[in-house]
Image: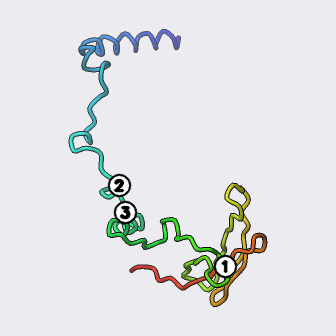
Amino acid sequence: MASWRFLQLVRRVVPQAAAYPRSVCLSRPCVRAMSAGGIPTDEEQATGLEKKVLEGLKKGEDPYNVRKPKSYPGTKENPHIVPSINKQRIVGCICEEDNSQIIWFWAHDGQVNRCPQCGSHYKLVPYELPH
């Protein structure tokens, strides 16, 4: 019974589809309404925090530290700089370049902190978020 109804439905739909030329329907993708104006860029469709970050990067700023930080030797006199809006922050150290293990430890404001495995030094510095 169900197959008979399916055949009736196919007989109604197929002749309507066959009325359209094959080149219009099947040989090229259907035209989307958005394609007349083009696909919006990241800047055009970004909102909120993402929009602020993209605008800042366009001006040459790094408002939310999304770029790779500047590299420091990691000595006690010249430690790696860790910006933070809080008095403490969790830091992850990849002690060797090809190592897949991350050593996590707390960095506290006002002191130079040392990685417990490799001995690299990190210093927490205050950071103000843009308004």
The residue sitting at 70% across, 78% down in the picture is 106
Circle number at residue 42: 2
Report the amino acid beneath label 2: Asp
Q: Where residue 52 sits in the image (x, y, percent)?
A: 37, 69
The numbered mark, 1 or 2, whose residue comes first in the sequence reads 2
Horizontal and vertical percent for residue 128? 47, 83
User: Which amino acid, mark 1?
Assistant: Thr
- Label 3 and label 1: CA atoms lie apart by 40 Å
Q: Quarter holding the C terminus?
A: bottom left
Q: Which of disc 1 and disc 3 is earlier in sequence?
A: 3
Location of residue 77 with respect to 5 vertically, above or below: below
Image position of 64 (left or right of 29): right
- Report crowding for label 3: few under 14, some 14 to 19, many 20 or more residues within 10 A (C-alpha): few
Of labels 1 and 2, the one closer to you? 1
Q: Residue at x 46, y 14 (%)?
A: 6
Residue 95 x %, y %? 71, 65
Which residue is under mark 1? 75
12 or 25: which is nearer to us? 25
| Residue at the outermost bottom position | 110
Element under disc 3: loop
Q: Is residue 41 found left or right of 85 in the rendered image? A: left
**Counting other residues with Cα less than 10 Å from the Cα at mark 1, is it few (<14), some (14-19), or many (20 or more)?**
some
C-alpha separation, residue under disc 1 versus residue under disc 2: 40 Å
Residue mark closest to the camera, 2 vs 3? 2
